[in-house]
């Protein structure tokens, strides 16, 4: 396999400049190509896309957004990036947690991303919703659409992994580590080898270019790509233990081998085109690869091959390459251009981007993320704590009613400030947030939301039905501090602790009893939390029973405690 060492062989300054080129180049390609994407929703459709002049200039544009039953016009600022860059930055923040990156990705970043996503693809949105319920997408619980959802995950072979994978190329300690990272990250959202193989090839080429002393020739780049194709059995060994049945793993192995053959054929097309020099137009090669075929242009393998071709063909004219990818007719232009921009940034650093690099959305934040990744600075010492779905919903509800200048805690734990609130139409408002690390996000929310009944409103519902009302259930404890710490870490929340009482969830409190815990008559507590098994492991509780997705243990006072996955989102 090609060497893709995690340690730069060039100076720290040169390596840092290239990393900055990767991160900012990815965002610039995304922002430049998003209006041209077939599924981007540009008003006027293909005719409007054809009328746009191919040039390295950001312009404001308007797209059709929203659910098919509630469409609205979304005015996109010049230089704004889409889900490609959002997910790349989410991966970068996960990587900054060091060895905890995988947990942070599935417990914090993916569950939070749908709240602020722009232009997200179906595979990642479905997987993120599953992680928000604390359920891995390959373990969809039985329900009316369970079989269909599971099949959709295992069929997901699009470029949603490759588009976000660049931070791993920067942080991996070597080629073996990089391969493991790509597959472990990739299967969190995509189950088909086509998504994983494309991401693997792209990640290894990117890692190699980042650390090369000089710009590589096309033959060397393709050699790196080919040698990154690991054996199917090795790929299967990197899957999570519970990823599938033996039959499903066997199918994965067979499909992986076939997909590697498919990737090799695509690289052969790239090689022939590069050896032919200027004999054919680059658009012809990209069409031959399938980049302009609406049925396949979002494939992980095709997009990776297309991005590698663009970077190699335009190695001496990186800005022209970025424009060519961003304006390729009938292509998945935002992802193709963002991945090509990442490769070109690895080759040339940051300066070639010119005014694009300084005017893309969150330019300063992108540079700071690149600096943290290249220097190895991180937040590995801070444990990952996912927020329960109820807290995520409460944070969003708070934003719906917010005013300009308000501050609060974003669902992923960052602090936000409401920078502006704009009216979109009669039903919607646009809330613009500045997060404490420098990223900006947009939430389009209802102007006058109807109050929804939440789990903690159940006491009020019960009162209306029966004439009575639950005030509070109090459970005794001999050690209030220990119980508060246990349930706080279990739920990933700060609990309201009084003089002798701690509120666990609305309606249930634990009160200190100096005489020790009072007889409870076989009391059992059942709570709904994201990732119940992980929550119990986090607090060191021994799991005594696992049945139908329920995990049972005991709390510090010996009460039986059952956790089940929260699927209310």
Image (cartoon, rainbow, N blue to C red):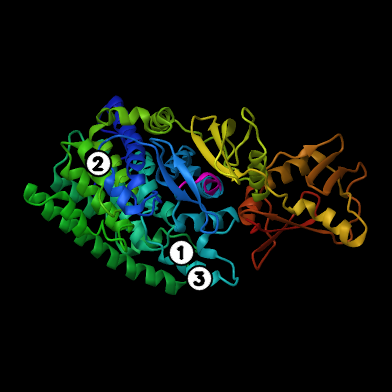
Q: As rendered, which of 154 and 526 lies closer to the eye? A: 154
Cα separation between marks 2 and 3: 41 Å
Q: Are the residues flagged by discs 1 and 2 in contact, CB closer than 8 Å?
A: no
Q: As rendered, which of 449 and 535 lies closer to the eye? A: 449
Q: Judge the density around disc 1: few (<14), some (14-19), many (≥20) Cα neighbours within 10 Å.
A: many
The residue that disc 2 covers is 54
Magenta segment: does it hold 389?
no
**Which of the marked residues, 3 or 1, is nearer the chain's N terminus?**
3
Q: Which residues are magenta?
A: 112-118
Q: As rendered, which of 528 and 10 lies closer to the eye? A: 528
Cα separation between marks 1 and 2: 36 Å
Question: Residue 414, image x and y in percent?
Answer: 57, 35
> Which residue: 24% across, 53% down?
305
Quadrant of the rendered image containing residue 285: bottom left
Q: Main secondary structure of the magenta part?
A: helix
Q: Are the residues flagged by discs 3 and 1 in contact, CB closer than 8 Å?
A: no
The residue that disc 3 covers is 148
């Amino acid at each position: 396999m090609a060497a893709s060492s995690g340690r730069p062989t060039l100076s720290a300054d040169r390596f840092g400049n290239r990393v900055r080129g990767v991160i900012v180049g990815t965002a610039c390609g995304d922002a430049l190509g998003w209006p041209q994407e077939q599924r981007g929703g540009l008003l006027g459709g293909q005719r409007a896309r054809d009328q746009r002049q191919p040039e390295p200039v950001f312009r404001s544009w308007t797209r059709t957004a929203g659910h098919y039953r509630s469409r609205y016009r979304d005015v996109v600022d010049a230089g704004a990036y889409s889900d490609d860059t959002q997910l790349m930055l989410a991966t970068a923040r996960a990587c900054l947690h060091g060895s905890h990156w995988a947990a942070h990705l599935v417990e914090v970043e993916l569950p939070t991303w749908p709240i602020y996503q722009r232009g997200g693809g179906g595979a990642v949105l479905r997987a993120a919703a599953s992680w928000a319920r604390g359920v891995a997408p390959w373990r969809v619980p039985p329900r009316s659409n369970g079989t269909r959802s599971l099949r959709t995950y295992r069929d997901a072979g699009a470029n949603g992994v490759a588009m976000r994978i660049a931070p791993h190329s920067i942080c991996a300690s070597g080629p073996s580590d990089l391969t493991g990272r790509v597959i472990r990250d990739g299967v969190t959202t995509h189950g088909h080898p086509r998504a994983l193989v494309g991401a693997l090839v792209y990640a290894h080429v990117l890692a190699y270019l980042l650390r090369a002393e000089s710009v590589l020739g096309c033959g060397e780049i393709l050699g790196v790509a080919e040698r990154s194709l690991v054996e199917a059995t090795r790929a299967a060994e990197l899957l999570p233990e519970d990823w599938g049945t033996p039959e499903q793993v066997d199918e994965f192995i067979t499909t992986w081998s076939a997909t590697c053959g498919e990737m090799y054929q695509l690289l052969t097309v790239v090689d022939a085109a590069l050896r032919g020099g200027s004999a054919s137009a680059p658009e012809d090669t990209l069409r031959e690869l399938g980049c302009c075929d609406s049925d396949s242009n979002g494939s992980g393998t095709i997009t990776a091959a297309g991005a590698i071709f663009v970077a190699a063909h335009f190695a001496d004219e990186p800005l022209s390459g970025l424009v060519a990818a961003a304006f390729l007719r009938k292509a998945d232009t935002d992802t193709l251009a963002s991945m090509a921009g990442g490769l070109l940034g690895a080759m040339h650093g940051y300066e070639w981007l010119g005014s694009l690099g300084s005017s893309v959305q969150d330019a300063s934040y992108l540079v700071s993320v690149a600096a943290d990744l290249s220097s190895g600075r991180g937040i590995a010492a801070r444990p990952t704590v996912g927020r329960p779905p109820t807290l995520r919903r409460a944070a969003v509800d708070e934003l719906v009613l917010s005013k300009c200048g308000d501050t609060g805690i974003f669902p992923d734990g960052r602090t936000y400030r409401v920078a502006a609130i704009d009216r979109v139409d009669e039903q919607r408002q646009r809330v613009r947030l500045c997060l404490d690390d420098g990223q900006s996000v947009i939430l389009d929310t209802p102007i006058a939301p109807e109050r929804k009944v939440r789990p903690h409103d159940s006491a009020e519902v019960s009162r209306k039905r029966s004439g009575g009302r639950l005030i509070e259930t109090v459970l005794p404890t001999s050690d209030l501090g220990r119980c508060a710490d246990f349930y706080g870490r279990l739920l990933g929340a700060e609990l309201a602790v009084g003089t002798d009482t701690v509120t666990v969830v609305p309606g249930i409190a634990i009160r200190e009893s100096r005489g020790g815990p009072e007889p409870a008559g076989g009391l059992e507590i059942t709570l709904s939390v994201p990732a119940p098994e992980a929550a119990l492991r986090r607090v060191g509780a021994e799991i005594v029973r696992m049945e139908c997705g329920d995990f049972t243990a005991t709390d510090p006072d010996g009460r039986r405690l059952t956790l089940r996955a929260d699927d209310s989102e």
